[in-house]
Image (cartoon, rainbow, N blue to C red):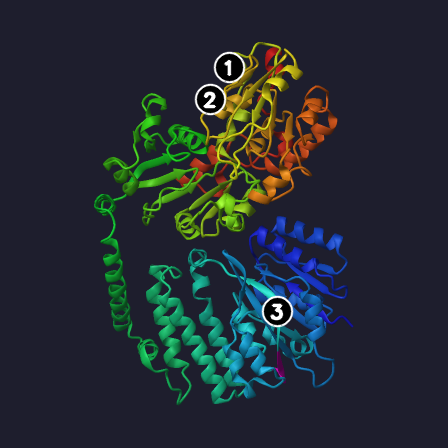
C-alpha cells in the first residue's frame, strides 16, 4: 500500500504553485502519491498541474469548482488519495529535497496502535532566507509520543503549520467533519486533527519549507482574511469542549488564541488601521467568552495586555501602546539630531506639504532616475494626455537633462521646493524605477511601477546571493520602496511571476503589456523610413542594431567586439548602430569606422529599433521588446558562464534564444555573413520567443493602463489582448521601402 500522499491544494500566484509542484515531483521516492486540486476557472494553474500529471505517473489532478471552499477542495483530494498518511501542502509551501523518502521512513507501521498524526518539523522561508529554523525542534524532540493530546497538551505550542502534520487516512475516514468547513481553515485543521487523534507522535524530520509573506503582503489581503482566525478558533473551542478536553488542553488552546490576537494587534505593518477597532472588539469577545473557568493570565506586561483584552478595554490598551510609541519616538528623535541640518529642513518642508489636500488631477512622472521623458512612463503620459487631458503632468528631471525635454514639458528638479510639493500632493506617481526613500505613500495616492524591461538577470531580493550585482543594495530599504507600489505593469507571465518573487509586496499586477512597446504595432512605413533617414541610413543598406548590456563586475564599458573589424567583414551594405546601456554616455574610444555609428545617446531607443533590420545583443532586455517587431535577433554570448555566475539569471538564454547564438566574434561573423541570422530555424526560434515574452504587447498597453488606473474603468471594459498571431507589427525597412 502507498505509504504517503502529498496533497497540494489552494490558490496562490502561479510562480509559487510552479515552485511547489516542482519541489514535489522532484522527489526521488517512487511510491509517492501526489494529488493536486485546481479550480476549473484557473486555466494557467490547471495547465501547469496537468503538464506535471502527463510527465509524472505519481501525479493526479482533481479539478474543483471555482467557488469550492478550501476544505471542499481538500476533501476532494482526500477521496482521490491512496496513501495511508496524507500531507497537506499549500502552493506557498515547498517539499525539501529527499523529504518524501525521509518522511515515509518515519511513518509508523500500520496497525490499530499506529498514531493517527505524525507531527514533523519545518523550515520557514522569508524573502531573505529560505531555510530559517522553525523554533519547534526542541519541543518536538522532547514530546516524541505517541500519546493523545490530553497527555501532551504542549502540542498546542507548536506552530499551526498544516503541512507539518502527517494525518492518517483512517482518522480522516472516521471523522469526515474535520474536512467540512468554509473559508480559510488551515489553522483550524492543523490543531483540530490533534483533538480526536488516539495517538500523536513527533519527529524532527523537516517535512516542508513554509513560505511566509511579508507583513505588507498580508496587510493587502481582503478584510475577511484578517478576520479568518476568529471563526477557526471558535470552531476549535467548540470541538475541544465537545470532546471533553481536559483543562490543560483548553487553557493551552486559549493562550495560543489570545497570544495570536495580541501579536496581530501589535504588528502595525500587518493589520490595516481601519480594521483595528473591529479586530480588537472580536478578539476581546473571544478573550472573555472562551476563557476556561479558573484559567490564570500570565504575569507582567504581557498579563496586562491579556487583562485589557479580556475586559474589552480598547482605550486603555491604546494608551499603553501609545506610551510605548512615545518611548520609541524619543529615541528616534535623539538619533535624528545627529543628521545634517539641511536634510532636516527638507523633511520638514516635505512634511508640511503632506498635510495639504491631495491633488486629484496631478500626476508626477519619472524615468531612469530623472533622465527625462522616456520609456513606459512617457508612453503612459502621452496616452493620458489624449484620454484625460484635465490631469496635469509634471516630470521629475535632473537639471542637466532639462534642455533635452520636449518643448513645454512641465518639470521639477530633484531637491527643489516644488519637487517636494508635487511629490507630496500628487494623486498619481508613475516611475520605471523607484522614487527615493523619503517619499511617503499617502492614503489615496496611486503609485504605478512600470519597470523598464523583461527580466533575464536576477532582480530585487533575488540578487541577495549575487553580491557583485547587488553592490551593497540595502534590501530592507528596497522593500520599503516596493511597499509603496499600488500597481506593477507586466509584459508577460514570466515577468509577472518574477516580479512577485523578486519584489514581494501587496501591489496588483497589471498584465497589460509594456506601453513603450505600443509603437511597434502603431508605427507606419513612413515612420520607419523617417527614422532611418534621421540616422543617415541609405536605402538598401542593412542596419544592425548592436545593444550590449551593462556588466556589474566591470568598472567601465569595455566593448566585447572588434567593431571596425566586424564592419569590414560584413561589407559595404551593412551599417552597425551601436547603442550602449543607459548607464553610459558614449562608445569608448569612438566609432573609428565609417559604418559604425555610435547611437548611445540617441532617444528614444524605440526609433532605433524601428530603423534596424536586425538586433544584435548579448543579454539586454531590449531583445524582449524588439521581438515584437518579428525581425531577426542574434545573441552574442561569449561570457555567458561568467555573466550567469556573477549576475544570476532566470533562464538559460543560450537554450531558449530568440535566434542564433554566437559564442565569439568568429561565430558571429559567420552568422551575419550567411543566411543563419534570418533562416527558417531563426524564424522558429523567434516565433517561440515571441509567444512567451510578447504575451501582452499588442499596441494597446498604454490605453489599458490609463483606463484602469486613471479613469477607474473595470477590467471587463478594457481592450482585450490580441493573440500574437493576430497582431501586425510595424513594417520592416524592406517592406516600408516597397510601399
Queried whether the magenta region covers residue 697, the answer comes back as no
Mark 2 touches mark 1? (CB < 8 Å): yes
Q: Position of residue 656 (x, y in %)?
A: 67, 38
Mark 3 and mark 2 lie on one chain; the one further toward the N terminus is 3
> Relative to residue 164, is residue 347 drawn left or right?
left
The earlier-in-sequence mark between 2 and 1 is: 1
> Which residue was labeled with disc 2?
602
Q: Is residue 357 above or below residue 399?
A: below
Distance, label 2 to label 1, CA atoms, is: 10 Å
Which region is colored magenta? 197-202
Label 3 near label 1: C-beta < 8 Å? no
In this rendering, the answer to whether 229 lies above or below 430 is below
The CA span between labels 1 and 3 is 62 Å
Q: Is residue 195 visible?
A: no
Residue at 62 percent of width and 67 percent of height: 88
Q: Quadrant of the C terminus?
A: top right
Q: Which residue is mark 3?
A: 206
Contact flag, marks 3 and 2 (Cβ < 8 Å): no
Instruction: Name the residue that disc number 1 marks.
Output: 535
Residue placed most toward the observer, 300 or 273: 300
Coordinates of residue 463 in the picture (x, y in percent):
52, 48
Amino acid at each position: 500500500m502507498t505509504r504517503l500522499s502529498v496533497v497540494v491544494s489552494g490558490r496562490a500566484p502561479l510562480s509559487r504553485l510552479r515552485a511547489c509542484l516542482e519541489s514535489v515531483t522532484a522527489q526521488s521516492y517512487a511510491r509517492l502519491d501526489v494529488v493536486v486540486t485546481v479550480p476549473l476557472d484557473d486555466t494557467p494553474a490547471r495547465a501547469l498541474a496537468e503538464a506535471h500529471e502527463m510527465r509524472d505517473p505519481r501525479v493526479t489532478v482533481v479539478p474543483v469548482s471555482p467557488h469550492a471552499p478550501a476544505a471542499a477542495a481538500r476533501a476532494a483530494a482526500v477521496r482521490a488519495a491512496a496513501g495511508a498518511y496524507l500531507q497537506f501542502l499549500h502552493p506557498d509551501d515547498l517539499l525539501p529535497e529527499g523529504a518524501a523518502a525521509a518522511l515515509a521512513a518515519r511513518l509508523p507501521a500500520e496497525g490499530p496502535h499506529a498514531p493517527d498524526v505524525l507531527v514533523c518539523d519545518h523550515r520557514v522561508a522569508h524573502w531573505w532566507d529560505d531555510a530559517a529554523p522553525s523554533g519547534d525542534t526542541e519541543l518536538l524532540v522532547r514530546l516524541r509520543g505517541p500519546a493523545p493530546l490530553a497527555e501532551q497538551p504542549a502540542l498546542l505550542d507548536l506552530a499551526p503549520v498544516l503541512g507539518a502534520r502527517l494525518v492518517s487516512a483512517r482518522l480522516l475516514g472516521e471523522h469526515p467533519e474535520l474536512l467540512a468547513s468554509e473559508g480559510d481553515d488551515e489553522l483550524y485543521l492543523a490543531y483540530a486533527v490533534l483533538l480526536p487523534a488516539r495517538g500523536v507522535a513527533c519527529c524532527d524530520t523537516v517535512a516542508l519549507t513554509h513560505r511566509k509573506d511579508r507583513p505588507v503582503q498580508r496587510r493587502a489581503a481582503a478584510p475577511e482574511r484578517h478576520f479568518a482566525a476568529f471563526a477557526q478558533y471558535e470552531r476549535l473551542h467548540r470541538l475541544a469542549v465537545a470532546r471533553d478536553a481536559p483543562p490543560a488542553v483548553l487553557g493551552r488552546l486559549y493562550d495560543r488564541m489570545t497570544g495570536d490576537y495580541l501579536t496581530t494587534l501589535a504588528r502595525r505593518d500587518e493589520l490595516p488601521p481601519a480594521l483595528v477597532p473591529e479586530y480588537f472588539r472580536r478578539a476581546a469577545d473571544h478573550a472573555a467568552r472562551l476563557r476556561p473557568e479558573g484559567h490564570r493570565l500570565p504575569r507582567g506586561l504581557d498579563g496586562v495586555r491579556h487583562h485589557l483584552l479580556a475586559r474589552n478595554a480598547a482605550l486603555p490598551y491604546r494608551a499603553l501602546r501609545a506610551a510605548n510609541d512615545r518611548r520609541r519616538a524619543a529615541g528616534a528623535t535623539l538619533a535624528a539630531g545627529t543628521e545634517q541640518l539641511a536634510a532636516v529642513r527638507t523633511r520638514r518642508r516635505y512634511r508640511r506639504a503632506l498635510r495639504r489636500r491631495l491633488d486629484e488631477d496631478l500626476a508626477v512622472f519619472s524615468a531612469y532616475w530623472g533622465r527625462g521623458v522616456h520609456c513606459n512612463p512617457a508612453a503612459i503620459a502621452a496616452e493620458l494626455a489624449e484620454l484625460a487631458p484635465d490631469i496635469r503632468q509634471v516630470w521629475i528631471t535632473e537639471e542637466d537633462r532639462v534642455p533635452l525635454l520636449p518643448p513645454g514639458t512641465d518639470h521639477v528638479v530633484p531637491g527643489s521646493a516644488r519637487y517636494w510639493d508635487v511629490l507630496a500632493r500628487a494623486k498619481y506617481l508613475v516611475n520605471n524605477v523607484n522614487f527615493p526613500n523619503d517619499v511617503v505613500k499617502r492614503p489615496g495616492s496611486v503609485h504605478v511601477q512600470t519597470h523598464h524591461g523583461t527580466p533575464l538577470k536576477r532582480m530585487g531580493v533575488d540578487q541577495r546571493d549575487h553580491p557583485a550585482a547587488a553592490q551593497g543594495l540595502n534590501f530592507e530599504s528596497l522593500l520599503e520602496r516596493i511597499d509603496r507600489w499600488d500597481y506593477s505593469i507586466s509584459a508577460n507571465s514570466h515577468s509577472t511571476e518574477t516580479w512577485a518573487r523578486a519584489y514581494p509586496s501587496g501591489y496588483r499586477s497589471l498584465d497589460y503589456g509594456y506601453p513603450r512597446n505600443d509603437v511597434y504595432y502603431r508605427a507606419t512605413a513612413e515612420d520607419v523610413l523617417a527614422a532611418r533617414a534621421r540616422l543617415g541610413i541609405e536605402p538598401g543598406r542593412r542596419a544592425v542594431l548592436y545593444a550590449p548590456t551593462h556588466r556589474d563586475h566591470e568598472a567601465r564599458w569595455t566593448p566585447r567586439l572588434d567593431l571596425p573589424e566586424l564592419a569590414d567583414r560584413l561589407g559595404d551594405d551593412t551599417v552597425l548602430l551601436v547603442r550602449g546601456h543607459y548607464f553610459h554616455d558614449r562608445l569608448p574610444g569612438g566609432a573609428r569606422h565609417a559604418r559604425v555609428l555610435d547611437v548611445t545617446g540617441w532617444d528614444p531607443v524605440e526609433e532605433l529599433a524601428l530603423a534596424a533590420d536586425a538586433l544584435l545583443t548579448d543579454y539586454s532586455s531590449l531583445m524582449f521588446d524588439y521581438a515584437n517587431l518579428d525581425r531577426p535577433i542574434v545573441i552574442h554570448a561569449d561570457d555567458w558562464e561568467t555573466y550567469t555566475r556573477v549576475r544570476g539569471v532566470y533562464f538559460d538564454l543560450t537554450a531558449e534564444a530568440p535566434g542564433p547564438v554566437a559564442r565569439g566574434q568568429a561565430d558571429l561573423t559567420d552568422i551575419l555573413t550567411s543566411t543563419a541570422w534570418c533562416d527558417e530555424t531563426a524564424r522558429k526560434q523567434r516565433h517561440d520567443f515571441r509567444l512567451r515574452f510578447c504575451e501582452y504587447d499588442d499596441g494597446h498597453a498604454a490605453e489599458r493602463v490609463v483606463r484602469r488606473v486613471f479613469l477607474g474603468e473595470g477590467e471587463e471594459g478594457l481592450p482585450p489582448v490580441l493573440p500574437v498571431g493576430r497582431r501586425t507589427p510595424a513594417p520592416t525597412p524592406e517592406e516600408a521601402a516597397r510601399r
